[in-house]
Image (cartoon, rainbow, N blue to C red):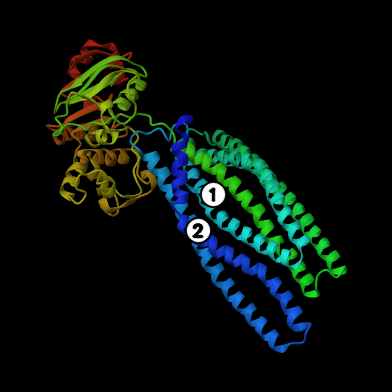
């Protein structure tokens, strides 16, 4: 993975630099604003020396007019500079979120490995926001630099010793601020890691809340989240202490620096080396410098947190794919011949299996883990450790996973639905979502029309997130209708009716057979009703095919088959 990290950094660099026009313009406006702010105490000193001290009303009016023009410029530059920088930050964060989502959804997978969904959500929200905020920090840094430069030039004009104090002291102060930000960067990264993990655990627990309550495991779940949240709190407190320490030290160093500027200016005024107006300007500039110097400390903190978040985002963007995309595409038209040649993966050991074009094939595994391994290989979520999976004579490993999934649909056992209506869920993968007649036929084949009939608005009834407003059996039937409506040349179904009553299951089994007639369908299931309508059944025991025959014949021949199907 380390070799891949630069790719993620390239994406980050491209996203951030993609806002360079807005950032550059915002920085110029901010620099102009802060430069104008620095000129205000200088102009006040000029007013004192050339108008007040000399009792010149005309000069007083002239310089007050100059001050008014400066303030108009300050208002314009601040308003438009802030707008541009905020827009750049929001757009950069949006593009990072888009890049993260695109990486997670890539058919090759790999980005989600070892990460809870909530952790990925935290990355796409908080971390992306922090990286986007770097554009604001860049603008503020440009503004602070302009303020310090104008102040130093003005102080050199008033007095060379004062200007040298600022010119020599400012870089030293900025360097010390950078050193002080290092502990914050390390602890900020740890804070975000812990926060992301806590979010992931919370989302995981909420998703399984109904199950947890059903088995009385609320206390164990609460203890797990409390432990995770406590670790996140500890990391946050450590990061907060580091930030407070950095802010405090930066403020103390700034105070010492300003005191030194004021001391030098006071001595020069006492010795008569600068005028009264010059002293007022010097004191005003010394007080004004407090703002830019504090901004410099804030910029260091923002950049430290941005670097930490950028490293976490780069890790996800650079994650190697679970399967390497091949250059090929499935042959058209797809006949639907599926063959596994000596496939070894997970518990599978040299598995030999084939499905003829248009066949309705049942697969029974005595070990549920073998079924999951088979599904992963068929859907090219993972490539076999040995052997090959072929579609119409072409190895899936040589094809683009996205193109494979266009023609081979693996519908898993988990019947998660999207937030929306029943009908919009069924049409999600349909070739023509507007073909309501086709969608209705798919719903009827899956028994989802009966589900719609019990709902207040029929198929237009809104279901909540993941379909949790429906029962388990209702969700399964809607999910099965969605899979059927996709019209995939090859459809792989994993236990699609486990939460459905026996009468409905038998009716659905016959309807599915009729609906999929002429197209390859593989049923990985232990349901007698579904197996009874298949053309033949393959028995997989201990990772190998031990027999192939009709369901009734396998019931007679194998004790292991009877146990898997009727237990």
Compare marks 2 and 1 and give the one earlier in the sequence: 2
The furthest residue to the left: 518
The answer to which of 80 and 226 lies nearer the viewer is 80
Query: Judging from the image, what secondary structure is the residue with disc 2 in?
Result: helix
Q: Is residue 171 left or right of residue 369?
A: right
Q: Is residue 481 above or below residue 324?
A: below
Q: Is residue 57 left or right of residue 563?
A: right
Q: Which mark is residue 130?
A: 1
Is residue 86 visible in the rendered structure shown here? no
Q: Residue at x 36, y 40 (%)?
A: 105
Q: Position of residue 379 (x, y in %)?
A: 29, 30
Label 1 crowd (10 A; few <14 / some 14-19 / many >=20): many
Q: Residue at x 41, y 31 (%)?
A: 320
Question: Which quadrant: the C terminus?
Answer: top left
Question: Which residue is denoted by mark 2 in the rendering?
Answer: 24
Label 2 crowd (10 A; few <14 / some 14-19 / many >=20): some
Residue 332: quarter of image: top left
Residue 117: quarter of image: top left
Q: Position of residue 109 (x, y in %)?
A: 37, 34
Q: Position of residue 250 (x, y in %)?
A: 72, 51
Cα separation, mark 2 vs mark 1, equals 19 Å
Q: Is residue 447 above or below residue 62?
A: above
| Nearest-to-viewer mark from 2 and 1 | 2
The answer to which of 348 and 559 lies nearer the viewer is 348
Q: Position of residue 468 (x, y in %)?
A: 38, 44
The answer to which of 314 and 281 lies nearer the viewer is 281
Residue 361: quarter of image: top left
């Amino acid at each position: 993975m380390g070799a891949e990290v630069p790719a993620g950094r390239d994406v980050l660099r491209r996203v951030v630099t993609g806002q360079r026009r807005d950032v550059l313009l915002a920085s110029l406006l901010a620099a102009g604003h802060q430069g104008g702010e620095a000129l205000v105490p200088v102009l006040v000193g000029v007013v004192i020396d050339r108008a007040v001290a000399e009792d010149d009303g005309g000069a007083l009016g002239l310089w007050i007019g100059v001050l008014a023009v400066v303030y108009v410029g300050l208002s314009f530059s601040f308003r438009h500079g802030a707008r541009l920088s905020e827009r750049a930050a929001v757009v950069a964060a949006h593009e990072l979120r888009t890049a993260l989502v695109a990486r997670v959804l890539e058919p090759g997978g790999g980005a989600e490995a070892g990460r809870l969904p909530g952790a990925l959500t935290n990355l796409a929200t908080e971390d992306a926001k922090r990286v986007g905020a770097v554009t604001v920090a860049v603008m503020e840094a440009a503004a602070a630099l302009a303020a310090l430069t104008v102040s130093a030039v003005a102080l050199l004009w008033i007095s060379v010793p004062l200007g040298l104090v600022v010119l020599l002291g400012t870089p030293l102060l900025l360097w010390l601020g950078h050193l002080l930000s290092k502990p914050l960067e390390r602890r900020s990264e740890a804070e975000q890691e812990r926060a992301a993990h806590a979010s992931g655990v919370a989302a995981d627990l909420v998703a399984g809340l109904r199950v947890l309550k059903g088995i009385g495991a609320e206390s164990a779940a609460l203890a797990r989240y409390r432990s995770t949240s406590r670790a996140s709190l500890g990391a946050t407190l450590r990061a907060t202490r580091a930030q407070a320490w950095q802010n405090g030290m930066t403020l103390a160093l700034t105070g010492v620096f300003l005191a030194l500027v004021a001391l030098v200016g006071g001595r020069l005024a006492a010795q008569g080396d600068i005028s009264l107006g010059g002293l007022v300007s010097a004191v005003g500039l010394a007080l004004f410098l407090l703002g830019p110097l504090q901004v410099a400390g804030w910029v260091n903190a923002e950049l430290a947190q941005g670097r930490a978040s950028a490293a976490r985002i780069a890790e996800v963007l650079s994650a190697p794919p679970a399967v390497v995309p091949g250059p090929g595409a499935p042959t058209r038209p797809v006949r639907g011949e599926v063959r596994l040649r000596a496939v070894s993966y997970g518990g599978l050991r040299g598995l030999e299996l084939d499905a003829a074009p248009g066949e309705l094939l049942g697969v029974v595994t005595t070990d549920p883990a073998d079924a999951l391994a088979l599904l992963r290989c068929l859907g090219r979520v993972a490539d076999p450790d040995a052997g090959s999976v072929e579609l119409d004579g072409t190895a899936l490993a040589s094809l683009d996973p996205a193109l494979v999934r266009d023609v081979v649909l693996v519908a898993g056992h988990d019947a998660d639905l999207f937030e929306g209506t029943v009908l919009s869920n069924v049409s999600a993968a349909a070739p023509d979502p507007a073909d309501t007649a086709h969608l209705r036929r798919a719903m009827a084949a899956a028994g989802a029309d009966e589900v719609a009939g019990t709902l207040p608005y029929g198929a237009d009834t809104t279901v909540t997130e993941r379909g949790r407003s429906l029962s388990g059996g209702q969700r399964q039937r809607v999910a099965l209708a969605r899979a059927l409506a996709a019209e995939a040349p090859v459809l792989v179904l994993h236990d699609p009716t486990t939460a459905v009553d026996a009468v409905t299951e038998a009716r659905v089994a016959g309807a599915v057979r009729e609906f999929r007639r002429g197209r390859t369908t593989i049923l990985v299931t232990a349901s007698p009703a579904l197996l009874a309508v298949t053309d033949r059944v393959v028995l997989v025991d201990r990772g190998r095919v031990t027999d192939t025959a009709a369901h009734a014949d396998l019931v007679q021949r194998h004790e292991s088959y009877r146990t898997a199907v009727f237990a």
